Image (spheres, rainbow, N blue to C red):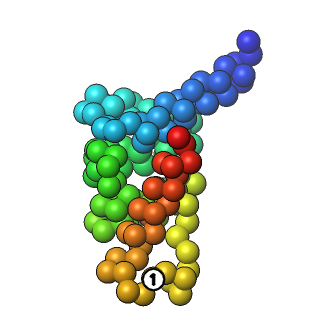
Amino acid sequence: MSQNAREKRDALMHEREILGFLEQSHISPRNLARLRTLGRSEDTRIADLAQLVLDVGAATPFRRRRIRILARERRDILNRMEKAGLITPQPPREDMDRYDIDPVAAWYEWVEYARSCGDE
């Protein structure tokens, strides 16, 4: 196996590992340590993704209500997740329910709910 093919395979495995942390019910301190290690990768894409998931795990280690909590407290992380393609972009402001107390949090919670129903 060539060096280039091995690097591509390793990058794919690392990416799957990183994304797997988001699917867990709890991102543990051990997982955070692993993400710190992956954040030092020479592959900038892997390092950036690991840093993003590390920030998510540090802010909201439990998956339940993660999106709603991030929408209320850490929109900067949600914006980064959106840019990385980890979550669905929110609709334009005019398409949101104006009577909802926090329409951004409600949108992300709905998207997360729809995704969880689709995975079953």
Q: Nearer the viewer, residue 32 or 120?
A: 120
Residue at the left extreme of this rendering: 29
Q: Nearer the viewer, residue 94 or 84?
A: 94
Q: Residue at x 67, y 28 (%)?
A: 8
Q: Is residue 14 above or below residue 80?
A: above
Q: Position of residue 7 (x, y in %)?
A: 64, 25
Q: Is residue 27 left or right of residue 45?
A: left
Q: How many marks?
A: 1
Q: Position of residue 50 (x, y in %)?
A: 44, 40
Q: Is residue 82 left or right of residue 61?
A: right
Q: Nearer the viewer, residue 18 or 1?
A: 18
Q: Residue at x 46, y 55 (%)?
A: 112
Q: Mark 1 falls on what kind of element?
A: loop
Q: Position of residue 13 (x, y in %)?
A: 57, 26
Q: Quadrant of the N terminus?
A: top right
Can residue 39 be seen by looking at this rendering? no
Q: Residue at x 71, y 24 (%)?
A: 4
Q: Is residue 114 above or below residue 49?
A: below
Q: Quadrant location of residue 40? A: top left
Residue type, mark 1 in image: Asp
Q: Is residue 4 above or below residue 83?
A: above
- Mark 1 — residue? 97
Can residue 99 be seen by looking at this rendering? yes
Q: Nearer the viewer, residue 55 or 62?
A: 62
Q: Residues within 10 Å of mark 1 (few under 14, many from 20)?
A: few
Q: Residue at x 49, y 44 (%)?
A: 49
Q: Is residue 111 left or right of residue 60?
A: right
